[in-house]
Image (cartoon, helix red, strand yellow):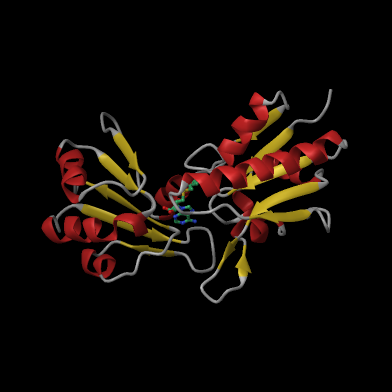
Amino acid sequence: MTNPISFVSLGPGEAGLVSLKGRQRLVEADCIFCPQTVARTGHPVSRAADIVSQLGVPAGALCFFRLPMSKERGAALLAYRALAAEARRLWMQGKRVCIVAEGDAGFYSSVHYVFERLREAGIPVEHVPGIPAFIAAGALAGLHVASQDERLTVAPGNISADEVAGLVEAGGTVVVMKLSQCADEMRRCITLHPGYSYHYFENVGTAGEVCLHEPESIVARQFPYFSLLIVKRPL
Ligand code: SAH
């Protein structure tokens, strides 16, 4: 049986939070495709590669790809297509191929489009699940993220202050991902409803991890890409 192309979830940033199955796939891989971005300084950075390189993977197995972060779908589709084609080419040569993603590879994860493309082309693929950032964030703060009858809403940065308030007033918990895309709305929410329970997280699982609960300190923060907010009604 041919090995599938494995989409390995890396969790939020700490190598210890990669599953045993995920690690196994990575140490056996010939090629591990890691997402890379360009920092403000102009240097290429890859949080995924930082995690993978702590796992004892074969030297030289790492390779990099860049996916456009903009909402412009055309450029993104071209990049997915190119990554799928390269993964497929190596797989056809009998190589063991992994494509990694931060958090879980099926939760707001661009590489899932590549997974779907390969699956549609009849290439065997597998998704090794991982810990999403918001679950790791809840653990960091010792939160019971959702309990009893509470509903949990996860929003990807397109949520308004009023929508968050409506959900919280109804007794729900709201997780706001991609915080940098709705920074003004979330600052407005905090200013209008300072009595809610806010838990702000940045770079969970890395050396630069931040966890804040004071509304004033959260409002004053510049929300980087790797930040999220959990909002609840106070106990
Ligand atoms: N697949 C990822 C989500 C990717 S979407 C997962 O399962 O968690 C990208 C968003 O995830 C970021 O904008 C941020 O809101 C959140 N995120 C991912 N990693 C994070 C981290 N280490 N700390 C805080 N937020 C993180």
> Percent position (x, y) of residue 140?
43, 55
| Residue ID at (69%, 26%) | 121
Residue 171 in view in this figure: yes
Examine the image and state in which quarter residue 226 appears: bottom left
Q: Nearer the viewer, residue 33 or 170?
A: 33
Picture coordinates of residue 66, whole percent (x, y): 61, 55
Q: Residue furthest left?
A: 192
Residue 100 percent across, percent down from the top left: 65, 46
Please give the name of the residue rendered at 14% of the width and 40% of the height, measured from the top-left corner. Answer: 169
* Above or below for 18 versus 209: above
Q: Nearer the viewer, residue 178 or 76?
A: 76
Residue furthest out toward the front: 74
Number of numbered discs on residues: 0
Q: Quadrant of the N terminus?
A: top right
Residue 115: x and y in percent read 62, 34
Relative height, residue 2 to residue 96 (above, below): above
- The residue drawn where x is 23% and y is 53% is 197
**Which residue is the extreme one toward the bottom?**
41
Q: Is residue 81 left or right of residue 214?
A: right
Is any atom of residue 146 visible in this view?
Answer: no
Identified at 67% across, 31% down, the residue is: 118
| Residue 7 to residue 27: above or below | above
Which residue is farthest right? 93
* 226 sits left or right of 51 in the view: left
